[in-house]
Image: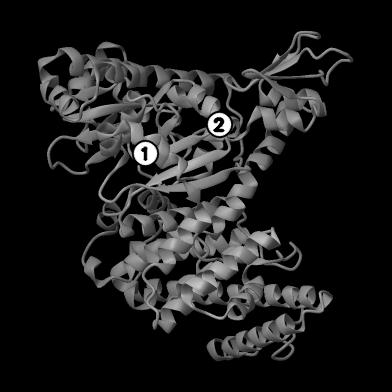
């Protein structure tokens, strides 16, 4: 069962921003916002919005409630209609029957209660039981104070198979419910056992302080080092931020939130007085997580690893942000998605590089007074991106320079401020020792990849393109030994989803030969593994196919994907030709026409049957195939 849509919409919607659209007089007063009530006539403001609880109340007419109540009263609609509109605004896809019934709400509350019971059990073991001695030793070794153990509710899962199972059973929690709560697992031959064993336990709470899941750190060299709760009706790792319930006030006070990678990093920050720090739980930052933290501040600082591999991983992580945004855009390099990410979420993202070889936990414990200065040195993500991409390009590395310009050009093209754009173009040209006119020319060409979105009538439905892509990757993953020869021929740029491009890279690696799909997934990081498991579940239960059938199906889907991409790109280029012509930009028009001609030539080479989409090498007919 997926996390219910109503909770996700609440998480992604800031009531202050919603109300501002209806109450222009809304102004901040202390920790609340006050304005003239939209539901009755008044001259003195008595309408209050409470950001912490995400509720409103009018002390004049008595109306109050949450985002759904406010929208229903403002638009005079029923709950289901309000749910649909707020889901659309929040980017949440509704399934039939998405609105939970009272019975479902009660069931969710019961799962939260069970996780709280487990937190109590783990906490008791850590602090008082002999079985928690190893956990206490680790806590002491890491320098976590008793106050932080209590504040964050740390616990310990004893080394055994049925300690929690028996405890929950004594509290009238049966096995299937324990499994649904993410705490137990079912034995193949019947019965249940503890999911978490011999691990230091970190309760994961929602922004209101409810325990909805756990992260467990293994002792010694046991793998995986960190084990999280599985996806449950109350636990969705991509929408949760560790420590947010404890950091909310400090985030508002500082008007800034610092996001670190691990639980211990966040705990160390709080222990030494830096309470506006939260953790992304080791995953790439997601739209849902940013929507959570930006209620307190729209300035978001990412504290990153200092090593080059970690920085490149950060760029790839930033790239995945766009997968939650404008799904109809052409795939684009690296951190460009962050531009749209910032615009959609109205947030400012900065990045701070830590001293070489230091993580936040170690740095803060050794020199806590340095932390505020390090955070103050946070730089806009664009500066960070340029640094990471340019630093290893040699003076005589022509190919490396070309790759950097190609990757950065779409990013610069998206900057709306011409002066800021010019600054970065000059900086890029100077650092690569290039003529600035070459960089400017590449920025213009980037329009073909990043500008105007095709209209719904002119474009193939995006849902169909993504479904084709996901199905293709599911088959490649499920039958990777049979399809590797096909996988290595797939142009990564033909895939819209950054996660699918990373999966394609892994599936093209001969090193995974002989592994099952499940073994391949087990070796992926958490976020990519979640995506891969979702792909496999979509093809689970389908009839077995002969090798030839599998290869033929993969080839046919790849053909469809390639054709749709060519059509889409041709329409993009034609749209940009028209835009450049309106601006009398003849240089851009000539360049774009050359791109369109080359695209048509490549299309004819790959797909010999004549395509009615092209009238000639320069002018696409504007009709579907």
Which residue is at a point 49% across and 50% down the rendered structure image? 379
Residue 493 in the figure: left or right of residue 508: right
Density class for disc 2 (Cα within 10 Å; few <14, some 14-19, many ≥20) is some
Secondary structure under tag 2 reads loop
Residue 591 in the figure: left or right of residue 311: right
Viewer-nearest of discs 1 and 2:
2
Where residue 555 sits in the image (x, y, percent)?
Answer: 45, 76
Quadrant housing the C terminus: bottom right
Q: Quadrant of residue 605?
A: bottom right
- Quick one: label 1 or label 2, which is nearer the N terminus? 2
Q: Which mark is residue 184?
A: none
Density class for disc 1 (Cα within 10 Å; few <14, some 14-19, many ≥20) is many
Question: Which of 434/121 is in front?
Answer: 434
Question: Which of 109/358 is in front?
Answer: 358
Where residue 481 sits in the image (x, y, percent)?
Answer: 28, 70
Question: Which of 6/434 is in front?
Answer: 434
Residue 129 in the figure: left or right of residue 151: left
Q: Is residue 174 above or below residue 533?
A: above
Residue holding disc 1 = 281
Which residue is at a point 13% across and 28% down the rendered structure image? 159
Residue holding disc 2 = 255
**Residue 162 visible in image:** yes
């Amino acid at each position: 069962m997926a996390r219910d849509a109503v909770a996700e919409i609440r998480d992604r919607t800031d009531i202050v921003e919603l109300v501002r659209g209806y109450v222009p007089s809304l102004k901040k007063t202390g920790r609340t916002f006050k304005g003239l009530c939209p539901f009755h006539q008044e001259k003195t403001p008595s309408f209050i919005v409470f950001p912490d609880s995400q509720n409103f109340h009018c002390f004049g007419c008595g109306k109050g409630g949450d985002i759904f109540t406010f929208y229903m009263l403002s638009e005079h609609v029923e709950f289901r209609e309000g749910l649909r509109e707020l889901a659309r605004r929040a980017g949440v896809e509704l399934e039939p029957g998405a609105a939970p019934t009272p019975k479902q709400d009660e069931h969710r509350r019961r799962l939260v209660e069970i996780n709280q019971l487990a937190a109590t059990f783990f906490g008791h073991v850590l602090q008082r039981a002999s079985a928690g001695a190893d956990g206490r030793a680790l806590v002491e070794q890491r320098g976590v104070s008793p106050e932080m153990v209590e504040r964050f509710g740390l616990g310990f899962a004893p080394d055994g198979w049925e300690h929690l199972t028996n405890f929950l059973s004594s509290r009238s929690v049966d096995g299937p419910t324990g499994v649904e709560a993410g705490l137990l697992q079912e034995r193949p031959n019947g019965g249940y056992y503890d999911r978490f064993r011999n691990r230091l336990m970190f309760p994961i709470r929602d922004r209101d302080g409810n325990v909805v899941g756990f992260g467990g750190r293994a002792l010694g060299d046991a793998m995986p080092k960190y084990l999280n709760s599985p996806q449950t009706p109350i636990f969705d790792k991509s929408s949760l931020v560790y420590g947010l319930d404890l950091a909310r006030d400090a985030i508002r006070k500082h008007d800034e939130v610092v996001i670190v990678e691990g639980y211990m990093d966040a705990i160390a920050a709080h222990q030494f007085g830096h309470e506006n720090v939260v953790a992304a739980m080791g995953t790439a930052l997601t739209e849902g997580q940013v929507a959570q933290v930006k209620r307190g501040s729209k300035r978001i600082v990412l504290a990153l690893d200092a090593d080059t591999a970690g920085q490149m991983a950060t760029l790839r992580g930033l790239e995945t942000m766009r997968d939650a945004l404008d799904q109809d855009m052409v795939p684009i390099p690296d951190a460009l998605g962050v531009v749209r990410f910032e615009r959609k979420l109205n947030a400012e993202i900065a990045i701070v590089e830590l001293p070489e070889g230091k993580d936040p936990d170690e740095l803060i414990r050794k020199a806590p007074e340095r932390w505020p200065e390090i955070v103050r040195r946070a730089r806009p993500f664009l500066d960070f991106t340029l640094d990471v991409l340019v630093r290893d390009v040699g003076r005589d590395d022509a190919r490396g320079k070309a790759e950097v310009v190609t990757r950065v050009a779409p990013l610069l093209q998206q900057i709306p401020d011409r002066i800021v754009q010019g600054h970065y173009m000059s900086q890029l040209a100077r650092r690569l020792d290039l003529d600035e006119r070459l960089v400017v020319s590449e920025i213009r060409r980037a329009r073909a990849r990043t500008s105007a979105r095709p209209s719904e009538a002119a474009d193939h439905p995006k849902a169909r393109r993504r479904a084709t892509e996901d199905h293709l990757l599911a088959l490649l993953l499920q039958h990777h030994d049979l399809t590797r020869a096909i996988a290595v021929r797939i142009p990564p740029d033909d895939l819209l989803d950054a996660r699918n491009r990373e999966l394609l890279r892994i599936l093209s690696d001969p090193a995974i030969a002989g592994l099952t799909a499940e073994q391949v997934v087990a070796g992926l990081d958490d976020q990519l593994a979640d995506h891969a498991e979702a792909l496999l579940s979509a093809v689970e239960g389908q009839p077995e196919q002969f090798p030839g059938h599998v290869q033929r199906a993969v080839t046919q889907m790849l053909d469809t994907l390639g054709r749709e991409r060519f059509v889409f790109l041709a329409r993009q280029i034609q749209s940009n030709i028209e835009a450049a012509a309106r601006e009398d930009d003849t240089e851009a028009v000539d360049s774009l026409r050359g791109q369109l001609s080359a695209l048509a030539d490549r299309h004819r080479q790959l797909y010999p049957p004549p395509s009615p989409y092209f009238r000639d090498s320069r002018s696409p007919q504007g009709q579907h195939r």
